[in-house]
Structure formats: structure tokens, C-alpha cells
Image (cartoon, rainbow, N blue to C red):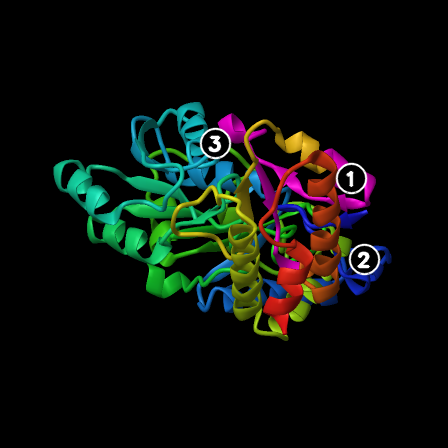
Amino acid sequence: MKILCAGPTSIDERVMEVMGKSHTNPDIDLEYEKRHRQVEKKISKLLKTDATSFIMLGEGIIGLEAAIINLVEENDRVLVLNNGVFGAGFADYVKFYGGESYIYEDDFRRGFDIEKLKKFLEKDHDFKVATMVHCETPSGITNDVKTICNLLNSYGILTVVDTVSGMGGEEFDFDDFKVDIALGGSQKCISAPAGLTLVTISERAKEAIKERKKPVPSYYMNFTNYYEYSDSFAFPYTMNENLTYALDLALDILMEKDSLALHKKYAEVTREIFEKAGFELYAKDSRSNTLTAVMVPEGFIAEDILSALRKRGILISKGAGEIFEKVFRIGHMGNNISYENFLELYEKLDEVFEELGIKTEVSLKETYVGLMK
């Protein structure tokens, strides 16, 4: 099955080969620790920073919850910025650990309106932490992390950014953007197997954790256990060396090319093809370079298109939440990206649309070939 969905992505055969080997015992092999630290430094390099990065064993969602459990204490106010399905999810974690969340909601089809956010903060900026999603995968929107986090930082608010679907495919300068905790995942643009959360943390966030009134109410998710290590306490639990080595190679593959330019190129081509064919894109602005959400034509649901593509050996995604059956999503991210993959996708979509009776103004395949010349 050809994977062209909004993640997890397809994985390079070389990465899977590394994943499938038994390498060492990470508990006792000192060479493993050296390799692990090198991988952590590569994560920081990807985000253009010397700030501390570390790896958590667990899918990206564990990092989102862990960021809250580390920074938020009882009655702390947290600003939850939400313009998509995943943004509001942070509010649940805040509630679990005794904090008070304020969900600031904006248009789900657009990036955050910065002037509107400025006016809100002028009236109310008494928040310890603010959370946001860099790339909202259900809607295909990439939010302006730099402008938003610099604004929040000017009020002394700690910033937590979910960049699981952006890391490696969208511009992200940790220091310049003034982010305090950036959270990534192994399975999206980096195209490593799912199962690792990538955390980059500022000194300001470390200090906030150190100054807590009460200890972090977790061992597994306590960030301090990851970056305050010694020779006798290298890791808080047994690491998965297979996942680490696979991530290491996947990062090398990603960084040996101009990944940002490649993602941007395929995003622009994808959007142009569907617009020329007469489709409406879900996102009206701030469109993502890692995936595109396309409105399903009236009289159909997303499953009509997805099931027809599955029969032809291709996987793409539906929407999520209220737009679950209203959009279909294509992931032009990481290892999904190749000329041949998308040539086959558009060829099969032409067949599917003809079979379903969905009229298009141009052939998707022919338009793709023309744009890629």
C-alpha cells in the first residue's frame, strides 16, 4: 500500500533495515549513550538551536501532556490557542493537573489573526503558560509561531508548541521564535517509525520547572530526569535502541537535502493542481507545506474517495472532528515525497473521480506533469 496520508508517513527502506536489527543493550553500553546524545544534538540542529533536546519513549502525545505536567501547577492559568481540532486538546491536560485553562478560539480555516490576539492580550495576559499547534493537520494550516510566541514572550508567558506535523517540513528557529518547549514526533516529516517524542526546552522553561512549588507529579514524564543525568543515571528508563538508530538515520536523510524547499515545492504544486481542477481548499490562508486539506465535492463524503483509492493501493486521510467526512487530506511530507509517488496518486485520482462522477476541470495527472517540468 502506498502511503500518502497526513502521517505517519512511509519510511525509507534503509531506516526500516536499521530498525529491524538488534544493536546493543542501551542500559549498559556506554557507546550507546554517546550515540543517543549525538541524536539529541541533531534534533537541536534541526531547530537551529543549541538548546537542550531529548527523546522520550512514547508517541508524540506523551510530550504534549508532559509539557503541561512539568510547567503547570494547581490554579496556574494557561492560555490554550485553538484554531483546529488539536489545539484545544491541551486544555484537557491542564484540567488533569489542576490548572485553569482559557481556550482562545479563532477561525478554523485561517491562521491566527495576530491583531485580534494582540488586542486580547492587552486586556488579559495574566497567564503562566500558553500552548499552540504549529501545523494543524486536520485543516492544513500552519500557524505563525514566530510572531505569536514573540508576542507571548513579551508578556513573560512561557510557550509550548506542538510541532509534531511541522518539524522538518516547516521553518522553525527555536531561539528566534522564542519558544520554550517544542514538541515533535518521529513519524511525520522526519519519517522514522512512530514511538518517539522529541522535546527541545529553553533555559527559561528549565528554571520554571526548578522553581515549582511542588515536585512534578510524575517520574516517566518528568523532564528533569531527561536532561539532568550523570554517568550512573544516563536515562530514566530503558531506551529503545532500534527506534533511536532508526531516528538517527532518518534525521541524516532529512538533513542531507533542502527539506524545507522540497516540502514547499510539493505543497504549492498540490494546491495549484486541485484549484485548477475546480476543488476548494479547506484552509483559506496560512496553508501548510506538509499537507493539504481539500473540500469533498457536494453530494459525496471523504470515504467515497478514500475507499476507491484504497482499492487502487493508495492511502490518504480524511479530515478530523466536524470535518471528518468533509475533506480529504494529502500528506506531502517526509518520505512520502517523490515524483513517482505523486504521479501515481494523481493518475489514480483521475480514475477515482471519473468512476464516482466527480467532474474536474483538468486532468490532475497531466497538470502535475506540466507543473513539474
Q: Nearer the viewer, residue 276 or 233?
A: 276
Q: Earlier in the sequence, mark 1 or mark 2?
A: 2
Residue with the mark numbered 2 = 16
Q: Which numbered dot is residue 310?
A: 1
Residue in the picture at 78% in, 50% down: 2
Quarter of image, res 319: top right
What amino acid type should be assigned to the residue bearing mark 1?
A: Arg
For badge 3, the amino acid type reads Pro
In the foreground, 60 or 340: 340
Q: Which residues are magenta?
A: 307-334
Upstream in the sequence, badge 3 or badge 1? 3
Numbered badge on residue 217: 3
Looking at the rendered structure, the secondary structure element under dot 2 is helix
Closest to the observer, 351 or 59:
351
Q: Dot 1, crowdedness within 10 Å: few (<14), some or many (≥20)?
A: some
Q: Residues within 10 Å of mark 3 (few under 14, many from 20)?
A: few
